[in-house]
Image (spheres, rainbow, N blue to C red):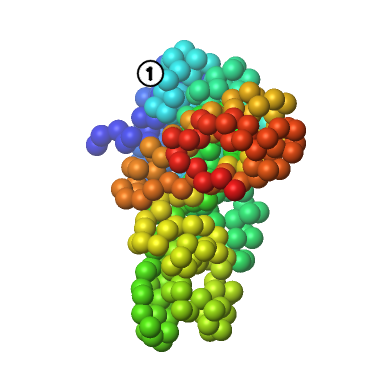
């Protein structure tokens, strides 16, 4: 019979611990019957018969079990850390091996016997930060959600949606946006409306011009039922229906979930125009918050340039998934920004010139 792969990994570990071929062959002979080679206790007992010191080393090595995210359990093996670092980052092997040894030492200094693979990854990330390997840290970072937040999301009944939104938000912030733009995003200077669902359009317009309210409402309900694949539906309210009580009640009930606008451009939230449109995403730049972070117009312009680069990176990323649609850029708080910097409104708009390639709408 051939030597099972499981025992080959045990043999490799024994060689690491200083065992020679005779000792490994003896362990194999004593444990090969049936499934005994899968039993660490039998291997430990066999080693005690020929080399008690080696048996003790083996026990210390094999006592730590790793719970993997794919629901499997295995013995801790620092070679897996090395392999994952080489696969996911661009650091040299020598550095990967050094990090793996450091992490292994930290784990073995504790009394734990079970450790999860996410925790091992966090220990590796901490070591990468300590060594100043920020690029490798970014590539090796794990995206996820804390257990507490997951449980709360399940209690609310929206775990699937919330988990996806959090993971995609983290991905956009840490992987897609340039760091300066990401920092300005996290401090609230600009927002991406569909950041948690970058793989879908933000809004697709429903346009139906009809004198019949019943027909409009009937078709609208059909439309809303089939718009799960977008972040928000966009609905044109015909001019003759915008003051209708039933329609107003509908708008009031759905205004947080649906973007309503009227045929003459008087919008409830965003102006999408009067024709059918696909909006890939809506980006809002808060000029007043930018002014709060700036001491001069030049400084504000520099931050606007950072945001512009972020918008460009996001647009390129979004186009990979949403083939049609435009990015709408809104700039809000111009007057408040002018007051903060004690300048004219026109001066603030000029400082925001880096945003002009995206045809922003000022308010």
Image location of residue 184, percent across then percent down: 61, 35
Say which residue appears at 68% left-offset and 35% top-offset.
Answer: 344
Q: Is residue 275 visible?
A: yes
**Residue 317, relative to residue 202: is it above or below?**
above
Quadrant into which the N terminus falls:
top left
Say which residue appears at 53% left-offset and 31% top-offset.
Answer: 353
Say which residue appears at 42% left-offset and 81% top-offset.
Answer: 217
Label 1 packing within 10 angstroms: few (<14), some (14-19), many (20+): few
**Residue 251 picture quarter:** bottom right
Q: Nearer the viewer, residue 47 or 242?
A: 242
**Residue 340, relative to residue 169: is it above or below?**
above
Instruction: Say how many tags the image has.
Output: 1
Read off the residue under disc 1: 21
Image location of residue 332, percent across then percent down: 61, 46
Say which residue appears at 45% left-offset and 18% top-offset.
Answer: 91
Q: Nearer the viewer, residue 185 or 266?
A: 266
Q: SS at mark 1?
A: helix
């Amino acid at each position: 019979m051939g030597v099972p792969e499981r025992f080959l990994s045990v043999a490799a570990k024994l060689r690491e611990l200083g065992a020679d071929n005779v000792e490994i062959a003896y362990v194999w002979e004593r444990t090969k019957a049936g499934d005994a080679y899968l039993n660490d206790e039998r291997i430990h007992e066999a080693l005690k018969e020929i080399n008690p010191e080696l048996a003790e080393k083996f026990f210390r090595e094999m006592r730590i079990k790793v719970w993997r995210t794919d629901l499997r359990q295995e013995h801790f093996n620092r070679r897996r850390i090395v392999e994952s670092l080489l696969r996911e980052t661009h650091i040299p092997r020598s550095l990967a091996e050094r990090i793996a040894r450091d992490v292994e030492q930290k784990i073995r200094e504790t009394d734990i016997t079970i450790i999860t693979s996410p925790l091992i990854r966090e220990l590796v990330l901490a070591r990468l930060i300590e060594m100043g390997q920020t690029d490798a840290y970014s590539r090796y970072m794990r995206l996820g959600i804390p257990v507490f937040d997951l449980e709360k999301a399940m209690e609310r009944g929206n775990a699937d949606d919330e988990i996806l939104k959090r993971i995609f938000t983290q991905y956009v912030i840490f992987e897609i946006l340039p760091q300066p733009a990401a920092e300005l995003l996290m401090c609230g200077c600009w927002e991406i409306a569909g950041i948690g669902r970058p793989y879908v359009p933000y809004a697709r317009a429903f346009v139906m011009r009809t004198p019949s309210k019943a027909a409009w409402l009937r078709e609208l309900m059909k439309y809303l039922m089939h718009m799960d694949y977008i972040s928000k539906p966009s609905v044109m309210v015909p001019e003759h229906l915008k003051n209708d009580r039933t329609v107003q009640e509908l708008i009031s009930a759905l205004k947080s979930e649906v973007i309503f606008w009227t045929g003459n451009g008087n919008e409830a939230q965003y102006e999408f125009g009067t024709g059918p449109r696909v909006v890939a995403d809506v980006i809002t730049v808060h000029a007043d918050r930018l002014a709060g972070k700036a001491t001069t117009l030049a400084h504000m312009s520099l931050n606007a340039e950072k945001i512009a680069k972020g918008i460009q990176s996001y647009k390129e990323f979004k186009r990979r998934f949403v083939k049609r649609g435009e990015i709408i850029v809104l700039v809000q708080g111009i007057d408040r920004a002018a007051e903060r910097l004690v300048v004219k409104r026109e001066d603030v708009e000029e400082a925001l010139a880096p945003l002009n390639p995206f045809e922003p709408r000022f308010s």
